[in-house]
Image: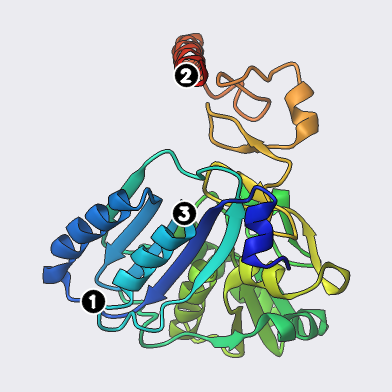
Amino acid sequence: MAHDHERTAAGQAIAVAAFYRFSAMDAVSLPALRDELVTTAAGCNVRGTILLAAEGVNGTISGPEAGVQRVLARLRRVRGLEPLEAKLSWAPEQAFARLKVRLKREIVTMGCPTVKPAEQVGSYVAPADWNALIEDPDTLVIDTRNSYEVAVGTFAGAIDPGTASFREFPAWVEQELRPLVAAHQPKAIAMFCTGGIRCEKATGYLLQQGFAGVHHLQGGILKYLEEVPAERSSWQGECFVFDQRVTVNHRLEPGSYSLCFACGLPLAPVELEHPAYREGVSCHQCIDRFSDADRARFGERQRQHLQAQGAVNA
């Protein structure tokens, strides 16, 4: 991987930090922390999303590296967040249009309040040890992300639960995973997600439901791509990220996908040639989901966006 100064010299001047930590937080103090984070981030030209809840913090932010580190340093002054780790990647421009710091019931929404990852989760597996675990035929490998993320890229042989949101994961466990485990009796269950937060919470749920041998990829796909050389990688494709880069490749550089701003789903370059694709208005995945009135509204929004963009670039 290139050093930071090499990335900056190559034009990758914006740092993008993805982070989370499950830790019992004082809910009463969260509004004040939110306000301070807004002030700190705004003063450093840092944008992105930070979610705060009684169970911890979850966020992705972008901006000048010094500003990003300042926001992270403020979070690490919170009791329980001292060990907060961030996965850094780089972009040629801001990865977010604005800053949002929100108070939530959960930092990643599963809808199972009895699951407490700060108290019980599965075994962490370092990126360097991940290949050996998932290549074992007695390991059941599960991608805990949404189906549209899986379609962009995943680990070889991983099961796609086919979920549209993380809220659907518990139902999939009961309907599909439990009978699958009963039939095959795997020695290990290995789960992964983008940055580690969903698969970590998923392990807590599985343990609560009586599953054994539960593991998850520490730091998620992003940490794996950072630490495991491409020639030894089991990763296939690109990795979807929830910012304006859309996807990143194995070097954690902006990937080849773009986003349909009508439905929010990723599009491969070849899909931009589909007859249903109209920039900002529709794609082959959503052409039947919206009415003519919706598409007219999307078209006007796209016109205004291009007009504003032209004014900025003039």
Front position among marks 3 and 1: 3
Tell me if I can see residue 108 in this picture.
Answer: no
Q: Say above or below: 71 vs 124.
A: above
Q: At numbered mark 3, what does the secondary structure look like: helix, strand or loop?
A: loop
Q: At numbered mark 2, what does the secondary structure look like: helix, strand or loop?
A: helix
Residue under numbered circle 1: 25
C-alpha span from label 1 to label 2: 40 Å
On-image quarter of the N terminus: bottom right
As drawn, the label of residue 64 is: 3
Residue at horizontal 65%, vertical 24%?
283
Residue at horizontal 65%, vertical 35%?
258
Q: Amino acid at mark 1?
A: Met
Front position among marks 1 and 2: 2
Q: At numbered mark 1, what does the secondary structure look like: helix, strand or loop?
A: loop
Image spot of residue 24 (x, y percent): 27, 80
Tell whether 264 sits left or right of 61. right
Image spot of residue 125 (x, y percent): 63, 85
Tell me the crowding category of disc 3: few under 14, some 14 to 19, or many 20 or more residues within 10 angstroms, Cα based. some
State the residue in front, 286 or 5.
5
Residue under numbered circle 2: 305
